[in-house]
Structure formats: structure tokens, C-alpha cells
Image (cartoon, grey):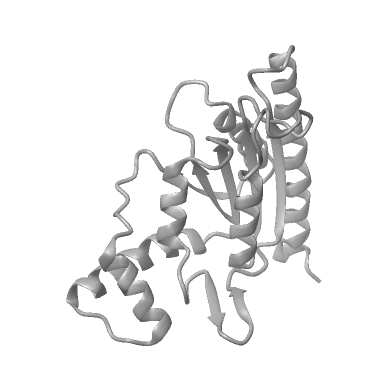
Amino acid sequence: MTKLFFIEASPPVRDSDSVRIADAYLKELRRQDFALQVDRINLWNEDLPPFDAIRVTATENVMTGRSHNSLQKAAWNEIVRLSERFTGADRYLLAVPMWNNSIPYRLKHYIDLIHQPGLTFGLKPESGFSGLLRSKQATLVLTAGNYSECFPAPAFGGDFHSTYLRSWLNQTGIVDIDEIRFRPSLLTADSAGEFAKAEHAAIVLAQRHARCLQQQSPMNIQ
């Protein structure tokens, strides 16, 4: 059974482009793979703890080998539970709108909580970071209102959106990453037509991923 973790970084508003496209992908993947297990989270509905002084110190203690006091231990255990929900998946689907050239702050908050030493990465002074999440795949659904590679920067902003997400995922060890883009959604003459193209691309990608999953199924391994 394949476990997919679906992160909605868009607020739960009606007709979120990123979520609608991601849902088209997920619907087709489920249609192709009935054994798919999906864990879905909307970060705006989650009561995320602050990444405050206690949690920062708890992280530093893990990295330096120091012990936790009772408050730090409780905080670290909470971080571990959050992170293990993420790391327990085989595949990831992220619906992420661009906010001010980057990602929504709730997603950054979530990443700061779950991206932790010994959970998603290792760190050695002589060699740097090493990702702990191997043989996993991520699909990014990226939307933006007024940024596109076709428009000159800086007039329409820059891309710290896909670049940040890829950099973070790579640091966890996830290098098999696909993107579905609908950018821009406000400045395109035929916005509905471009959205339909993005939705179709999501369905085609889901079909390709389903074929890969079928090939990896234990029933197909001789």
C-alpha cells in the first residue's frame, strides 16, 4: 500500500486554484490505484505549536547531544509526532500558492517544525547535510497570481517559491520531484483555458505516476 501525504498550503477558501488542480491529480491517482492511502492536512486548520525558544533549544540539544529538561522533552516529543506524520509517507502532494514571491507563512511554520535533525536530515561538520528520506516522491502544484517566467523580473517579482520548496525537499533527501504550474492566474488573457491545461497536465501526470506505482507493486516484482 502506498501512503500519500497531501499538504494544502492555501487557506480553506472556495475555489483555491492550487487545491483544485491538486484534487484533479489526486482523483485520477486514486482512480488508477485503489490501494492508495491518503493523509490530508490543511495547515490553516491545524493548531501548530510555535517554534519558540523552548523548541529551538530542544533542537539545538539534539544537534549537540545535550539532554532535555522536562519542558524541552515535551516540546521535542510534540515535534517528533508532527514530523513522523510527514516522514511516514511514501509520496507527497503539495498545493502551494505563491505569496510575495515565496510560500505562505503557515507552510514555512510547518516546515520549521518538522524539518529536524535525526528526523528529516543528518548534519556532520565535515560533510554538511544529508537527507534521511530516500526513495520518496513529491508533486508540487504551484500557482501564482502575477508571477511567471515569461514576464521580466523584477517588474513581476521573483521565484523564491518553487526554488525554496525544491531546496527544502532536496535537503530531506527527496529528489524525485514533479511540478504542475498555473502561473499567472490573474494576468492571463484566457485564465480558464490555462487552468484547464494545468488540470489536464495534473491528470496526465497522475496516470504516469500510477503506472510507476503499478510497476513497483510487489505483485509485479519477479
Q: Residue at x 77, y 54 (%)?
A: 212
* Residue lying furthest front: 154
Q: Quadrant of the rendered structure where residue 215 is?
A: bottom right
Q: Is residue 176 above or below residue 104?
A: below
Q: Is residue 29 above or below residue 50?
A: above
Image quadrant assignment for residue 205:
top right
Q: Is residue 178 visible?
A: yes
Q: Is residue 180 left or right of residue 130?
A: right
* Marker count (numbered): 0
- At which x and y percent is residue 181? 70, 35
Query: Which image quarter holds the C terminus?
Result: bottom right
Q: Residue at point 71% right, 43% down? A: 179
* Residue 145 location (% of width, % of height): 61, 25
**x and y percent of residue 132 in the render?**
58, 73
- Image quarter of residue 171: bottom right
Query: Along the line of sight, which residue is nearer the eye, 93 or 185?
Result: 185
Q: Quadrant of the N terminus?
A: bottom right
Q: In this orientation, which residue lies closer to the viewer: 51 or 4?
A: 51
Q: Is residue 8 left or right of residue 137?
A: left
Q: Position of residue 86 (x, y in %)?
A: 48, 59
The correct choice, above or below, for 212 with respect to 75 in the image is: above
Q: Residue furthest top?
A: 189
**Residue lying farthest to the left in this orientation:** 70
Residue 1 in view, yes or no? no
Residue in view at x 59 percent, y 52 percent: 92
